[in-house]
Amino acid sequence: MIRNLRRFLTLCAIFFCLQEVAAQRKVIQFSGLVVSGEQSYGVAYASVFVPKTSRGAYSNEFGFFSFPLLIGDTCIVKSQGFRSQRYVIPDDGRESISVILYLQADTTILPEVEILPFPTEEDFKRAFLSLRLPETDMNRMRQNLNPRLLERMRFNLGMDAGLNHHYFSREQTNNIVNQNFLQGSSQLFNPFAWGQFIKSVKSERDRKKRREEDGEE
């Protein structure tokens, strides 16, 4: 009983000593930027905390953080995909500390794993060569690959995006080329227009001949 009482008093003395030491430690504002890579870009939502305490914070989307600490605390900086880093708060008389914490990428190269449906390549070849499709599937395949059916489908198939673009580009090019020509110039190659022209010439010649005959009379 006396031994347990001495142990309890010793623990109480140690506890009060630690409380006194902690009370003497100075509180400062710890701020910083968590960055990584050659371009020093900010690491978003990295955790900066003191183990076994409630002191800590997360960096924002730009990698910045700020929270109060005690002098002598050891901070742990962690983020997914990066190696952890430690930082001890120095006792240099400053009221606040601002630092830049660099994290290194933690890259792990796993061995290559090849997944095959068969234990060996020979087993796959043997199974593939011995494969026999049902007769109904074979008949459906022959029907779908019928040349006449494919030809009919080709004629009934509408224009796709590529053909529509080709048609639009060709029409636009023709409009640009022919924009300086007269609208009626295409009648030179119209056989019906030439027929009407020849007919009108003959009619004019006949009327002229009749007038000459009437003048002689």
Image (cartoon, grey):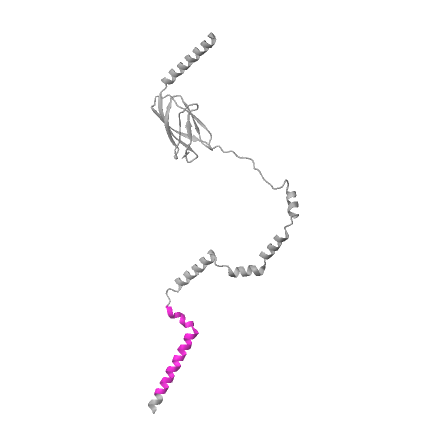
Q: Nearer the viewer, residue 136 or 186?
A: 136
Which residue is pictured at 42% across the width and 62% down the height?
171
Which residue is pictured at 38% across the width and 83% down the height?
205
Q: Is residue 167 magenta?
A: no
Relative to residue 63, is residue 9 depicted above or below? above
Q: Report the span colored magenta.
A: 182-211
Q: Is residue 200 magenta?
A: yes
- Quadrant in the picture for residue 75: top left
Which residue is pictured at 40% across the width and 70% down the height?
186
Q: Nearer the viewer, residue 21 or 157?
A: 157
Q: Main secondary structure of the magenta part?
A: helix
- Quadrant in the picture for residue 193: bottom left
Q: Would residue 116 be found to the left or right of residue 172 on screen?
A: right
Relative to residue 157, is residue 50 depicted above or below? above
Q: Nearer the viewer, residue 111 or 118?
A: 118
Residue 52 percent across, percent down from the top left: 43, 23
Q: Nearer the viewer, residue 113 or 107?
A: 113
Quarter of the image for the C terminus: give it: bottom left
